[in-house]
Image (tube, rainbow, N blue to C red):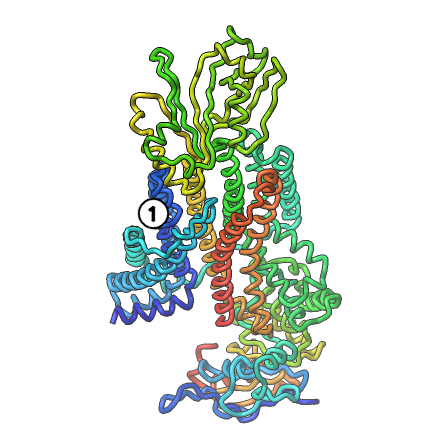
Amino acid sequence: MSEILTVTDLRKVYGKGGAVTRALDGVSLSLEAGEFVGVMGPSGSGKTTLLNCVSTIDRPSAGSIVIDGKELTKLKGKELAKFRRERLGFIFQDCNLLDTLTAYENIALSLSIVRAPAQKIDKRVREMAEFLGITECLNKYPYQMSGGQQQRCAAARAMVTHPALVLADEPTGALDSKASSMLLSRLDALNQELGTTILMVTHDAFTASCCRRVVFLQDGRLFLELHRGNDSRKVFFQKIIQVVTRMGGGMADVL
Amino acid sequence: MFSKLALRNVRRSFRDYGVYLLTLTFGVCLFYTFNSIEGQGAIVYLSQSKNPMVDAIMMIIDIFSVFVAVVLACLILYANRFLLRRRKRELGTYLLLGLSQGQVSRLLFLETGIVGLISLAAGLGLGVLASFGMSALTLSMFEMDMSALLAVNFSPAAAGKTVLYFGIIFLLVMLFSGVRVSRSKLIDLIHGERKNEVLKPRPLMAAVVQLAAGVICLAGAYAILLTFGMALAVAVPFLCFPMLGLGTAGTLLIFRSLSGFVMKFVQGHPGVYYKNLNVFTLRQWLSKVHTTYLAQTVVCILLLLSIGVTASSVGLNNTLSAMTDGEAPVDITLWDYCDEESGESPMDFPALLREGGFDLDVRLSGHSSLILYRNDPEVASFEREGEAPVQAVLSVSDYNRQLALLGQPSIALAPGESKIVEESPVNGASHWRYLIVEDEAVQGLEVSCHCWSANYAGQAEESERMIFQLIQPYDNTRSIYANSRLETYMDVMGSKILALFLGLYLGFTFLLAAAAVLALQQLSQAADNTGRYSILRRLGAEERQVKKSATQQVALAFLLPLALALVHSVVGMKAANDIIATAGRVDSAASSFVTAGVLLAVYGGYFLATALTCRRMAKNA
């Protein structure tokens, strides 16, 4: 399979002179098309910084990020915005739906932004909504929907443009367990059935256990990589827990 | 330390809160301009000629100034409250760092003081210019050339008064800020940014119905106005109130429902709906309607009033000339009422003037005497059945002499004929009916009075002063009246200038208030929108598009009231067409355009300042 994302020796340094913080200290990582990868690590391990760099929100201090054959660190201004809207999809913890728009319009807006032809928008929005099971709340405003519905709506918004890579930052962070399972099963289905490549940052071992592969970060470095292989989700969850226990204090809070 | 912090904060205010400073500066400028009218050309001229209106104008402006000051004080307090709300977090941080509430109050005190000084200085500077502009505007309304009176002048009294009033307003603002800080809780200040916004779903069909109702209301109001004409529709209460009621209700409904209607309409056109950020912009507009539609209605009505004042000053100018001509067909008329009992011979005005050294041949271009007789039905039954009574009887040769003075063709009467004339040939008796009869017919009628009329050959004011001086000694002994065109003109001019000053003063005050409220509303909304803009940016929307959406939102809020006000005033002008169509005087039209231009400049200034700040807020989101 072809590589969608290749991160090579990525470094991000905050501060100057003596008081520097190395948020990322030489991380290398690659994702193939159709992979579902989780990133775990304690607070301050660099998860979010990695995601921000990959999502072009932040710029790395050194190293390279190649998505779909494009070197991100060389893109600027308009090109960056174009790349972001056409090749990337985002799902955030606080789902970030526009509160003045209905669910339908939230999803349609990301298609307007990529200048999709108007007559195709309706069909694509409805398809994606059906896939994520939010057809009945398409005409509702975000505050009229449950947290799980909002998050699935955000997922639909991220996926509807068929991005090369979907970046999810703690998507289940604000959800209860039932809504989490629902969202995760839909993400899994998107990955399996539509072949969407997903990179998900999470704190939660259970959430991570639905990924095909989990990478662990600690102090800005890649600590360990776990492949699910043919394990059942339960077995994979146990393995993740073991790693978390080995990593010690830093992750204790997540159990 | 404190002053350094205060200065730094004010510098930042310059960038972020341009609207606040703009409001203060315009407020000071407005206040100074109208309080300095004493030194402005028109008033200088009116007071030189001892016009009694001058005192009235000054007094009324004084009274209204208090009212305007109250409006401005409320406005500034509102703007300040908005500023404080935006700075909650910052103030909370000061308190968290250990400053006492007294110290924070002192900081705000200093800041208000600095802002006050800057806006006072800028406003007074602008006021001197505006005062010059007002002077030019009012002088251009006189029919004579008055450019000699036009000069830049600074009135220390008006400046002092402005400083006093605004000093009090700033003190109030300081007190208000201090009280607010000392009464607020730290937790509220720190979490000041968080807020719950309540959005209610509103069916779009309701908007369509409301818009239809609004259009019907406006159509009703327009129909009343156009059918009955401006004069009738305004004067008759049972026409006026329904018209104003329907007009206001229609305007209100339209502003309330237009966004919903446009939304409904655009939803049927996916090509427009899904273009760029249109969905977002439209939804933003729709969601803010309930906070903006009232302000928009008020702004629309105030804009209409401002345009109305301008237009009617044109109309007034023309009516004024017509009135002066009707009241005073000649430059001066002296009346000498005869006392029957004393049997005195009538005053010989030409002889009196000549004795006093007044050269009739040089100073007058023409003069004539008239004898007015009382109509006596017993002697001569000139009065006709069913007609209004005749106030004076004239002999035809007297009348023709007078007509010659007026430069009109003489009339001829057949033997035994008589003629009713309603146009007064002399000053001061404009609504009289005159009966013109043959010279023989007046014999035996009782003499009512002698009238002597004259036109000046130039140097009108000096000649008039001399005449008044010469007849003054007879003031107490005989019933002599003088009726001069200049006096009539001044009287009318005085009321006209009073109306103009008041109209502009109040018009500008309300315009300022409305525009500022609209601007502050937009700014606070823009601040709430920053989160939404950052989402758009994450979705990959281009910077240009985000800024465009921000500008469009401000433009919708500002330009819709202006557009509707223009529609209203076009209809209003059409209704008042008979008044305005005849007022084809170029100079008054030019001054009206200048006034309209200044109105638009103030409103446009607010629009620009708001749009720029909102764009900047969107950019930094």
Residue farthest along the top direction in this orientation:
B378
B266 vs B217: above or below = below
**Percent x, y of residue B35:** 34, 49
> At 36% across and 24% down in the image, what residue appears?
B480
Mark 1 is on which residue type? Glu
B119 sits left or right of A192 in the view: left
**Percent x, y of residue A26:** 50, 93
Q: Which chain carries label 1?
A: B
**Percent x, y of residue A134:** 66, 63
The 10 Å Cα crowd at callout 1, few under 14, some 14 to 19, many 20 or more, is some
Quadrant where the N terminus of chain A is found in the figure: bottom right
Quickly name the residue at label 1. Answer: B38
**Percent x, y of residue B215:** 64, 43
| Quadrant position of residue A150 | bottom right
B386 sits left or right of B50 in the view: right
Q: Nearer the viewer, residue B179 or A95?
A: B179
B500 vs A51: above or below = above
> At 65% across and 58% down in the image, what residue appears?
A139
Q: Can residue B379 be seen in this view?
A: yes
Q: Nearer the viewer, residue A91 or B1?
A: B1
Q: Can residue A145 be seen in this view?
A: no
A74 vs A158: above or below = below
> At 33% across and 65% down in the image, what residue appears?
B91
